[in-house]
């Protein structure tokens, strides 16, 4: 993307304020949300709670007040992108299965996109309170501290994040790729929240990450955090060899080798 004609940093402030408020709601209501009715979406394992819906509603209400007229695409209610101008992309709880179990790797993710490209984003973790942010051209931060990817240069000594979709048939193919890749890296993590997995690449907590079939809301903020920290990032639609719906992020020192290893492990065909 060409250099922006405006400063995206004020958009980050909007995203942070709203995501913090939503994260507080998500945490405050967790007990009742997980004890109450838990609906399912694409499969029986793909869950949605009252807190996902309430969080998205809160974000939509706040954006309508602070950024009137700008469309919102959210995981639970959908939406369409702006023909011209900014679109907000919201995951009200990324890592809902983790949320259901109390596994603390889940987050509220909010990004502003221009023509489908993220220009500002915030990922806020309800449990730890960590705030991950990025503005295009202005770096990425965790709680105000600038982020940088790891210095890894050897794939065989790299820690890689991975993920599975909800369809059992596709999971089987993803698991086959996982098995092949596992012999070529230090280890693989499946932590269960794509936005945070991408932030983990930004922080050097992971050397790379790859997953298929994410929703735009899963990667919109986290991929910008990774990119602004220096990661090589490939988004759905941009890398046919990895598969049309692949999301990929890696520190530059292993990016080419990880890409090759994924292709050779059958990742592009899952
Ligand atoms: C989930 C993720 C998870 C990924 C799933 C799903 P949700 O998001 O972030 O890591 O593997 O496919 O998209 O549904 O909890 O917002």
Image (cartoon, grey):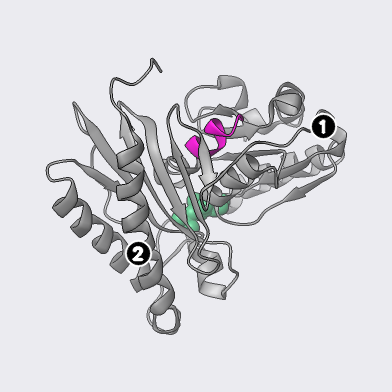
The spot of residue 119 in percent (x, y) is: 37, 32
- Distance, label 2 to label 1, CA atoms, is 38 Å
- Position of 76 relative to 52 (above/below): above
Q: Which residue is mark 1?
A: 155
On screen, residue 26 versus residue 102, left or right, reads: left
Q: Which residue is denoted by mark 2 in the rendering?
A: 22
Name the residue at 48% across, 30% down: 236
Front-most of residues 130 and 126 = 130
| Residue at the image position 55 percent from the left and 22 percent from the top | 239
Range of the magenta residues?
A: 223-231
Q: Position of residue 54 (x, y in %)?
A: 29, 68
Work out whether residue 230 or residue 239 is closer to the camera in this orientation and state it: 230
Residue shown at the point (37%, 79%) measured from the top left: 37
| Number of marks | 2
Reply above or below: 270 against 104.
above
Q: Which one is earlier in the sequence, the residue at label 2 or at label 1?
A: 2
Tell me, yes or no, if residue 39 can be seen here: no
For this rendering, which residue is in front, 267 or 75? 75
Indicate left or right for 157 with 231 as reference: right
Q: Is residue 202 above or below residue 55?
A: above
Q: Identify whether 170 is placed above or below 258.
A: below
Residue at x 75% of width, y 27% of height: 254
Q: Does the magenta segment cover residue 224?
A: yes
């Amino acid at each position: 993307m060409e250099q922006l004609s405006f400063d995206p940093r004020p958009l980050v402030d909007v995203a942070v304020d709203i995501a913090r408020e939503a994260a507080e709601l998500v945490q405050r209501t967790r007990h009742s949300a997980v004890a109450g009715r838990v609906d399912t979406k694409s499969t029986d394992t793909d869950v949605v709670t009252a807190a996902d819906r309430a969080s998205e509603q809160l974000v939509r209400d706040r954006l309508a007040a602070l950024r009137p007229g700008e469309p919102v695409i959210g995981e639970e209610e959908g939406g369409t992108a702006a023909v011209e101008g900014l679109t907000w992309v919201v995951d009200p709880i990324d890592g809902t299965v983790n949320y259901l179990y109390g596994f603390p790797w889940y987050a509220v993710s909010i990004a502003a996109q221009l023509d489908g490209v993220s220009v500002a984003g915030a990922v806020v973790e309800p449990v730890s309170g960590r705030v991950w942010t990025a503005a295009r051209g202005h770096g990425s931060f965790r709680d105000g501290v600038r982020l940088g990817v790891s210095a890894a240069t050897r794939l065989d000594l790299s820690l890689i994040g991975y993920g599975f979709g909800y369809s059992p048939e596709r999971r089987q193919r993803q698991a086959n790729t996982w098995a092949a890749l596992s012999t070529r890296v230090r280890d693989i993590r499946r932590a269960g929240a794509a936005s945070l997995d991408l932030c983990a690449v930004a922080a050097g907590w992971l050397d790379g990450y790859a997953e298929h079939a994410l929703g735009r809301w899963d990667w919109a903020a986290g991929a910008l955090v990774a990119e602004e920290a220096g990661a090589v990032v490939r988004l759905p639609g941009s890398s046919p060899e990895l598969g049309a719906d692949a999301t990929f992020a890696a520190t530059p020192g292993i990016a080419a080798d990880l890409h090759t290893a994924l292709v050779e492990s059958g990742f592009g065909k899952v």
